[in-house]
Amino acid sequence: MSSWDHVERSFSAQRILGAGRSGASAVSVCIYSHDTFGLGHLRRNLAIADQLLRSEERFEVWLLTGSPVIRQWILPPGLHVQPLPPVVKTGAERYAARAPGQVFGLTKGYREALILKLIEEQRPDVFLVDHAPAGMNGELLSTLALIRNEMPETRTVLGLRDILDSPASVRRSWQEQELHALIEHAYDDVFVYGSEQLFDVVGGYGLSAAAARRVKYCGYVVGRSRFEQLNGAPRGSVCWDVRRVAGRPVVLVTAGGGGDGYFMMSAYLQGLCAGRANDFYSVLVTGPLMPRAQSEALQAAAAGRDDMQIVAYTTELVPSIRSAELVVSMAGYNTSVELLAARKKAILVPRSVPREEQKLRALLLAKLGLFEFVPADEDLAASLAHKVPRAIGAPAPDERLWKSVDLRGAERVAAELAGRGIRSEARVQGAA
């Protein structure tokens, strides 16, 4: 059985039966999450779906997702799921079917048909598209055309994290793909999951005047802990709650999904394993998408030490972030906002290829005085060996800095889709 068959069987009952709140008064929302790499899009869209389903207004929510690990996640009660055959990004606008032996063209065609079929059947009040205006490799173009021509009552919304890449790279890519025109003509609104004071999407990405009038800065989207949702650890969940181990503070090292985090974790081990045992305990969460050979190499490097442990992955990272003394991570959107929400001391080690997104975010947050930035260069192992022990004992940032960042993104998205607005109360200090 292929990985896609397994996902399909896992969700067939949920797709047919659903569990969402229905009725004439419910606002129906279909969320598209292409999920070609990592866990970021999935986690952000689940946070939004959860907020919608908890709102005072009645929402019925469908999630279209291409994540290969969706069946492993604890989903918000009431969420309908339509899984899409997983694909993986292999380069700039290049993709391949994730399952071995499958032809990408057929996989893309099936995804496109599933999306079109769901939109035709549900005729949602809102179609919320995450990140990719045209979808993975243009797979949304037929659906967007159908909505514009035959479903004028459906509100189309593009949801963007604030930093996508360097502004010049985004402008160039969007011009090549004619996405500026698509955004102007196919979308009623553009929700930015960020703050205009921290990053100006309109000016940075060159949106037209018409598109700029539809932009709404919602604030950063951070999801509730699944433990907060279910009032305790759910049966069968995968979780690692880090606390003080044998009287030692805990350093949590995470690379999100882990697909591109080996460079950081191997440097961490190289730097921290060079000398005697440390006065702190390290927990490295490799992530479900790290290649097995890389995960095994990390296990081998940490073998025999009593000051660290390697954990394969967790579907619930938030309790671990909250209870750690220090977090060392890359600078993906979701991990960064979870660190902000937890008001946690952190060292950010962003990747700089194939996009500059993480580097730009890490530099911005470091400039605000919230986190420490360490470049991923040839001295990374030595830098971490030097900075981690010092950061553990360093004072936390000033309380006013934490309060300067707006984290009500999910709540504001729900309010916007329900037809009411929420005033932004956050004020940014020291941002350039």
Image (cartoon, rainbow, N blue to C red):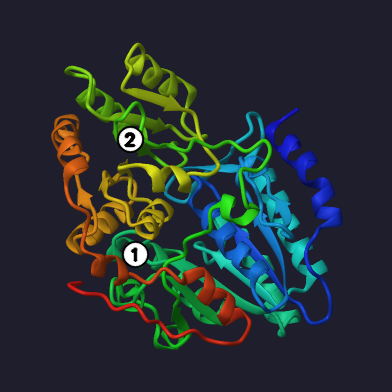
Task: Report the residue at 66% width, 43% height from top.
Answer: 234
In the image, farthest residue toward the top: 304
Task: Report the residue at 26% width, 30% height from top.
Answer: 280
Task: Report the residue at 64% width, 73% height from top.
Answer: 55
Residue 375 appears in the picture as rendered:
no
| Callout 2 touching callout 1 (CB < 8 Å) | no
Q: Nearer the viewer, residue 353 or 8?
A: 8
Percent x, y for residue 332?
38, 51
The label nearer to you, 2 versus 1, is 2
Tell me where residue 146 sits by quadrant: bottom right
Say what secondary structure mark 1 lies in: helix
Q: Nearer the viewer, residue 375 or 271?
A: 271
In the image, farthest residue toward the front: 247
Left or right relative to 389: residue 198:
right
Q: In the rendering, which numbered label is found on residue 250?
A: 2
In this picture, is 173 found above or below 208?
Answer: above
Q: Earlier in the sequence, mark 2 or mark 1?
A: 1
Tell me where residue 293 sits by quadrant: top left
> Residue beneath label 1, please?
172
Task: Report the residue at 16% width, 32% height from top.
Answer: 378
Left or right relative to 91: residue 84:
right
Name the residue type under label 2: Val
Name the residue type under label 1: Arg
Q: How many marks?
A: 2
Q: In the rendering, which numbered label is found on residue 353?
A: none
Characterize the local packing of mark 2: few (<14), some (14-19) or many (20 or more) Cα atoms within 10 angstroms.
many
Left or right relative to 264: residue 77:
right
